[in-house]
Image (cartoon, rainbow, N blue to C red):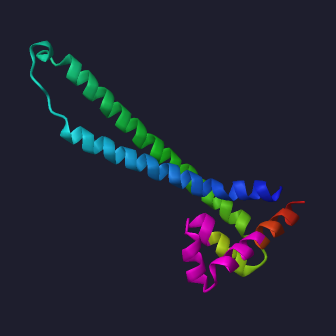
Amino acid sequence: MTESEIRNFLNQGINLAKRIESKKILLLHMKQSATRITRSMTAERVDGTVCSDLMENAVLEYVSLEDEIYNDLAKLTFLRIELMRFINSVEDEKTRTLFQFRYITDMRWENIASSMGYTYQWVFELHRRGIKQLALQAV
């Protein structure tokens, strides 16, 4: 694998976690919107079919999005296990810890530097070296 391919592989978990969070926010908005829906009683809507069809579609979309989130969470769990196996192949313990913080727990770079007691720049250098080492191992 090339260094770029390794970065892409490692970033899969972060990207999927961001998509899940985005879907959770959408789900929350859908729920909030649904609680504000009121029926207007007009002559055309007395039978209720238009409103009930719209409400039924909204509920189906909500449930469908919940299912997507559940499936994505399952994918994320398995992906993180796969990432952990890959990260464990890194020989240097400090680099391995950095990768775990970043790619398993989705920790921000600033927080990684603080947790590890390193400068922001050193964390990036350590990361670059780790990616390079993984690329050499993959050859």
Identify which residue is drawn at 59% across, 65% down.
Answer: 104
Percent x, y of residue 27: 36, 44
In this view, the residue in front, 107 or 125, is 125
Percent x, y of residue 4: 77, 56
- Residue 76: quarter of image: bottom right
Report if residue 89 is visible in the image.
no
User: Where are the magenta residues, as a range?
Assistant: 101-128
Q: Which residue extends farthest top?
A: 44
Q: Taking 49 as reference, is 138 above or below it? A: below
Identify which residue is drawn at 58% across, 76% down.
Answer: 112
In this view, the residue in front, 86 or 42, is 42
- Residue 41: quarter of image: top left
- Residue 64: quarter of image: top left
Q: Taking 94 as reference, is 105 above or below it? A: above
Residue 100 located within the stretch drawn in magenta:
no
Percent x, y of residue 69: 46, 46
Residue 129 lies left or right of residue 104; in this view the side is right
Percent x, y of residue 48: 16, 19
